[in-house]
Image (tube, rainbow, N blue to C red):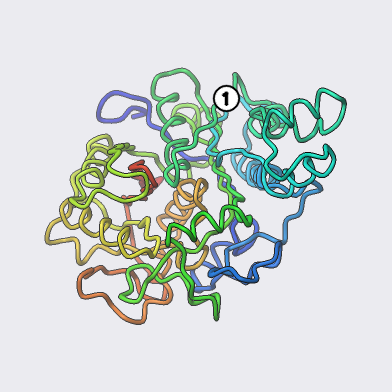
Amino acid sequence: MDTDHLGRPIVVVTGMGVLTSLGQGQADNWKALTNGTSGIRRISRFPVDGLRTTIAGTVDFVSVPEPSAPALSQRLAELVIEEAVSEAAIGSAGNFPGPLFLALPPVEMEWTQRFALANASGANDTVTYDDLIRAAGKGGFEPFYRRFLFGSVGEALADRFGTKGSPVATSTACASGGTAIQLGVEAIRRGETDAALVVGTDCSVNAESLVRFSLLSALSTRNDPPSSASRPFSKDREGFVMAEGAGALVLESLASARARGATVLGIMEGCGEVADGFHRTRSSPDGKPIIACMRAALADAGLEPDAIGYINAHGTGTPENDKMEWVGVSAVFGERATSIPMSSNKSMIGHSLTAAGAVEAIFTVLSIRNGVLPPTINYDIPDPALPVDCVPNVARSATVRHAISNSFGFGGQNVCLVLGAAG
């Protein structure tokens, strides 16, 4: 059958590309992830003297001529799309047969660009977008204008890879990657397209973003050694680690994949999305939105909680977020909650923010396909209030047919994905 329990086209994954602080490509990332390797390092891109947090999961092995988060985010997206489209063997060069759904961080002028504009125009350091428009209108700063005032990343990717229709860019905080996947799944289920290209990319490790998160007391300050900083579910967790990365998935209807003889890597069985708006940064203390989100994903997949064999946790390593995730998991899975493996990729790659949902969905597919669950490293002091089986420190072999990948973001943006085995 090519349809699901509700008569909708079954949506499958036929290509994946990933790049994180662990390296570029599925092979390098999967090897490092299952070996418990950390990609967290001291920041060298900009001065960190005087900052409380001096570490991040940066991708300094990728460079761009224009030093800005949008430019680097675009470059990472290009690299992962190339890998995903190549694996899917779909379309032809510059001619992808479907739309682009892109998860992207907010595009804004950074300090480097503001200072450059201020110095050139003789203005003070509080230059605005109006100043940028005037500077561009005089024939200068045209690249800045195009980069920071338009949807340049999505348009550039659509032009390069030949996706169909206008690119759709979404930014739902740390749930963005999951939101983009859900948009692709829904487009295929509605019969609007046989294939969709879904990308999450984020290179927000810059001085301004680091300071902002630090002012929220959200970041780990365990700077030495950097590899020990991210400690999801551990009693001594004290914040997340910012990171960069990108993930791309080629989604198709099962009928389309079969018709062209494509290899099915995994099945997108269900999506759940719930926004609660409880607070700009905090989770609702009763966990209701998270509970509703996971239950919505299970219902969409037509599965009972007992069918889930693994949870790729959001697992940021902040005291409150990990607690709220456990509250949600324990409510949905009841007595099984303590025995379901629930590991956090962020213990090794850091929190790739807008890209996290896409990156971690890819790692979930790889976990199912390879029969190996990545560990949660730095789990040295268990938290008795969170009795999770977090696959501590060492990867584990396991046969999993259905798994959940959680993404919970600031502002109450919550997305849960249910992924299934291909065969």
Q: Secondary structure at mark 1?
A: loop
Image quarter (top left, top right, bottom left or bottom right) of the N terminus: top left
Q: Position of residue 77 (x, y in %)?
A: 64, 43
Q: Residue at 43% of width from left, 18% of height from top?
A: 191
- Work out whether residue 339 or residue 203 is closer to the camera in this orientation and state it: 203
Q: Residue furthest right?
A: 139
Residue 281, placed above or below residue 222: above
Q: Position of residue 341 (x, y in %)?
A: 29, 64
Q: Residue at 61% of width from left, 38% of height from top?
A: 107
Q: Is residue 86 visible?
A: no
Residue 87, placed above or below residue 93: below
Res 189 quadrant in image: top left
- Work out whether residue 155 or residue 182 is closer to the camera in this orientation and state it: 155
Q: Position of residue 113 (x, y in %)?
A: 74, 44
Q: Residue at 67% of width from left, 29% of height from top?
A: 149
Q: Residue at 29% of width from left, 50% of height from top?
A: 283
Q: Which residue is mark 1?
A: 98
Apparent side of residue 212 relative to residue 21 in the rendered image (left or right)? left
- Work out whether residue 390 or residue 116 is closer to the camera in this orientation and state it: 116
Apparent side of residue 86 relative to residue 409 in the rendered image (left or right)? right
